[in-house]
Every structure is written in structure tokens, then in C-alpha cells.
Amino acid sequence: QVQLVESGGGLVQPGGSLRLSCQHSGSIFRIYILAWYRQATGQQRELVARISSGESINYADSVKGRFTISRDNAKNTVYLQMNSLKPEDTAVYYCNLFQRSDLGVSNNYWGQGTQVTVSS
């Protein structure tokens, strides 16, 4: 069983920066995607950024050029560096792991979420 623990959320002024961290415990499969999603109040959960085991990286259009996803395999941690934050970035941010074994078995895990509030 894999557990995901997020940290780094908080209150920041517009234009500020935050770095979210998500540490996963337990072994993961060779093929995986680590991602950050967010859900604003009254809105659907949306993909923010993802990084695959094959080093492919994708961003939502709304965060391109401002957010950077990265990972440290030695620390079992994926990061989301968020710069030039805007009020519309306010949401609960969730870490997600999707993985697939060599036998085709797939699993999907979510963290508990961390609140990011951008406000003056």
C-alpha cells in the first residue's frame, strides 16, 4: 500500500511563491505518473502538472511558465514550485500517483490535500 503525504501549503500574497512537497511511502511500480491536481471550492478537480517515470512532463495551460514539477527519487518526493501566484490558484492541492505493474495491474492513490490560499 502506498501513502502520499503533502506539505507546503499556506497563505501567500498575489505574486508570491510556494513549494508543495509530496512524499510517497512504500515501493512503487516501474511505470508511474506522479501528478498534482487542485480543486477550488465549487469546482471540479483539475490536473495541474504531472511527471512520468519516462520523464515526460505536462502542465495545465493556466500554470505554464509559473509552476514547475520535479521529483527527487532518492527522497521519494515530488515537488510543485509555484511562482507568480494568482488568487485564482486558490484551491486544495492533491498529490496523485498512478502506477501500472508489468502484469498490467494498475493502482491510483491520492494524498489528503493541502490548502493553498492566494490573497492580499
Image (cartoon, rainbow, N blue to C red):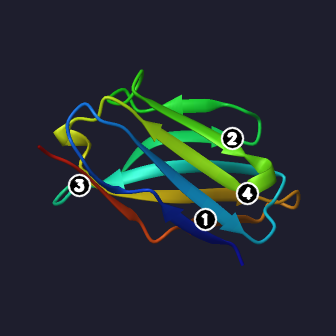
Q: Quadrant of the N terminus?
A: bottom right
Which labelled disc corresponds to residue 52? Answer: 2
C-alpha gap between disc 1 and disc 3: 21 Å
Left or right: 12 with respect to 5? left
For marks 2 and 4, give the one nearer the viewer. 4
C-alpha gap between disc 4 and disc 3: 27 Å
At x 54% / y 31%, what residue is drawn?
58
C-alpha gap between disc 2 and disc 4: 14 Å
Q: Secondary structure at mark 2?
A: strand
- Name the residue carrying label 4: 76
- Name the residue carrying label 1: 108
Q: Which of the marked residues, 2 or 3, is nearer the chain's N terminus?
A: 3
For marks 1 and 4, give the one nearer the viewer. 4
Residue 15 drawn above or below residue 65: below
Outermost residue toward the top? 65
Q: Quadrant of the C terminus?
A: top left
C-alpha gap between disc 1 and disc 4: 17 Å
